Image: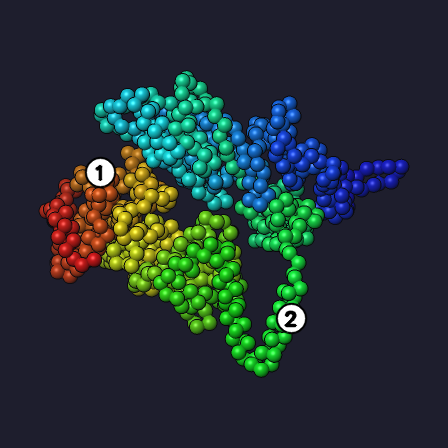
Amino acid sequence: MCYGDCTNSDGSHDCRCPLGTHGDPTMPDGCFINFVPGNCSTSCGDINVPYPFGIGSAGCYWPGFDLTCDTSQRPAKLLLVLLEYPIHVTEISLQNNTVRLSSYFIMHIDPSHSTTFILRNFSGTPYSLSTGNEFILWGCNLQATLTGGGLEDFISGCASFCPSNVSDTNVETALRRRGRYCNGMGCCQANIPMSSNDIPTSFKLKELNKNDDQELTSQPVYVLIAEEGWFDQQQLSKEIAGQEKSEIPKVQVPLVLQWEVIEGLPRSADMKVHPGCPSEVAGKLCKSKNSDCKRGSRGYLCQCMDGYDKPGSNPYLADGCKGGRRPLSIGIYLGIGVAVGASIILFVLAGSFIHKKFKHRKAQMLRQKFFEKNQGQLLQQLVSQRADIAERMIINLDELEKATNKFDKARELGGGGHGTVYKGILSDLHVVAIKKPKAAIQKEIDEFINEVAILSQINHRNVVKFYGCCLETEVPILVYEFISNGTLYDHLHVDEPRSLSWNDRLRIATETARSLAHLHSTASVPIIHRDIKSINILLDDTLTAKVADFGASRYVPVDRSGITTRVQGTRGYLDPMYFYTGRLTEKSDVYSFGVLLLELLTRKKPFSYISSEDEGLVSHFSTLFTQGNLPAILDPQVMEEGGSEMEEVAAIAVMCITLRGEDRPSMKQVEIKLEGTQASRGHKGDNVRNCPWTADGGRSEVLSRQYSMEEEFASSSRYPR
């Protein structure tokens, strides 16, 4: 069998590797690209062009990494032709696996109607948009949303406002004074977080609702994606001054792309089959013996080993990783000899002592490795509270492999964007849930570290208990108590007409509120969960609620009312004020909890529900509540079992989902009100339970209790926090 080029010469068949390659053509993937440095250009102008990038013939670059050097300009310009569009390359980094580009990436937009724009699609190329960029909207009273694989896959976004009754000249002057940063006045910026499946492909622009006296200014509207830290509002204002509003500003904008090798690999490189880097890929791609093969999000990469990564090293070339290791001096050799001799003597005299010291040294090395890979964030948080907690909570990988039968698929409990959860039994017979990450992405490493730091500080009956973590992998593996009865989402959204009883729903809501109130006001440092939803409420055998998944949570210093951070949460549960301003407070959790109450009352899914009037769950519920027509949306089982408590809980939910955060109650106030509602069930007759609505569908007199809620919330502030 010939896997190369088969020709007929002098009556005989001849099998050879294609031009520019070498190897064994009779073997699958036996032909390798033949790169000869002396025959290929390694620079263009003042830009270095390291392999796998190249200029010229196919033998000078890996498939997909060809560049063009435009020598008609002075100095010569290095160009990347991406989707038939040449873009100026200003830097190539092998260490960071990035390419920095410079081009006219600013889009002029007509905001007169809501519309969706398709961004440049990098599929089929080695490139994707780096998280080192940011999304920028320039204009007045607009909202831009960046989406991924589908139009509903939210990635990032921001909103920009301008004051009413202000002339265009004054608005432009105000914009120029703000300099490098903007926080929603005339322009806004947003980070671009993403996982391997969330590459931005489109954005949607819509006009925000205005007051009667507020009109759009005639300021031009621009949208751009640029390298983080480049944007300067004042400088950009000067560049576009005097232009027609329909013109695209002639401003060179830097952009950073991430790259990985996805073409020209052996068939064994199927990422769905192999969890790591196959040996065939490593042998073909990473030519230096002092290099490692790494799995990326879509392909593979090579890196020089520690000590062989001095400037100019290239893991894609034979002998490309050259040592930065210094030879040991005679004094060091003598010191090593003395140390070895002393160790042998000590081993003979006190073997047990050496054994203990070795174990201690091994633990220290493990901690040091963790500090180096993960910036020491986790242990710094833990050691600051108790000096011995870090050592107790570290669980070795062997223990977890035994607990899960080497992470057997039959032990999987579920999974999501962050990783897979397994059921296991530790050597001390504790049944645990083990959360194993999918890939070593820095964003997810930070979220795992954040979750460990926060959970180690919490000890509450209604918060999932944290046992420890394993640090012997690239990303920490987290170990929790095993919660046996699934999630609240699983119990609510079933095909049967009946779900959890009203008693259970009211108790679960009260327990969840109690845990959030503890996080906000009782914990030593206030904590905002930031992702309250039914999927993150676990239920044990007795249907006791356990709040889980603190990967997105944040500390709030006691002397501050909130923090400004990248917007993160789940569509349908996300606080709109947090989305617009980027300012995170405890009231963002209150809003998400209010949506959870709506889900308990209606059994509707907040992230997908759309009414016949094209309203989401929050808007539709609020409208029906105001009209006194809640039976149109409530779960029939809640109508049957809920009685007047149902109306009290509905009123609490409406206060929690109020648009202005200042108008929402605190979680402590919500907890006290729900506890009172739950306790009152034992003092009411069955006739009250079954007659909450009048014959014409309107609310009965029982609803009048809701109007005293604000007074009750005010009085509850006297309770100790």
**Where does residue 1 sit, x and y in percent of width and height?**
77, 46
Residue 494: image tag: none
The vertical placement of 207 against 52, above or below, is: above
Q: Name the residue under label 1.
A: 623
Q: Which residue is drawn at 51% across and 51% down?
A: 439
Query: Which of the 4 quarters of the picture holds residue 500?
Result: bottom left
Q: Which residue is drawn at 58% across and 45% down?
A: 95
Q: Where is residue 428 in the image (x, y as percent from the top left)?
A: 43, 72
Gap in angstroms between the C-alphas marked 1 and 2? 82 Å
Looking at the rendered structure, the secondary structure element under dot 1 is helix
Circle count: 2
The amino acid type found where label 1 is placed reads Thr
Say which quarter of the image contains residue 14.
top right
Q: Where is residue 163 in the image (x, y as percent from the top left)?
A: 27, 28
Task: Describe residue 568's horizontal placement relative to residue 104 as left or right.
Answer: left
Query: Which residue appears farthest toward the bottom when viewing the image?
Result: 349
SS class of the residue under badge 2?
helix
Amino acid tagged 2: Gly
Q: In this view, does 422 lie above or below 319?
A: below
Horizontal and vertical percent for residue 373? 50, 55
- The disc at residue 337 is 2
* Left or right position of 407 against 140: right
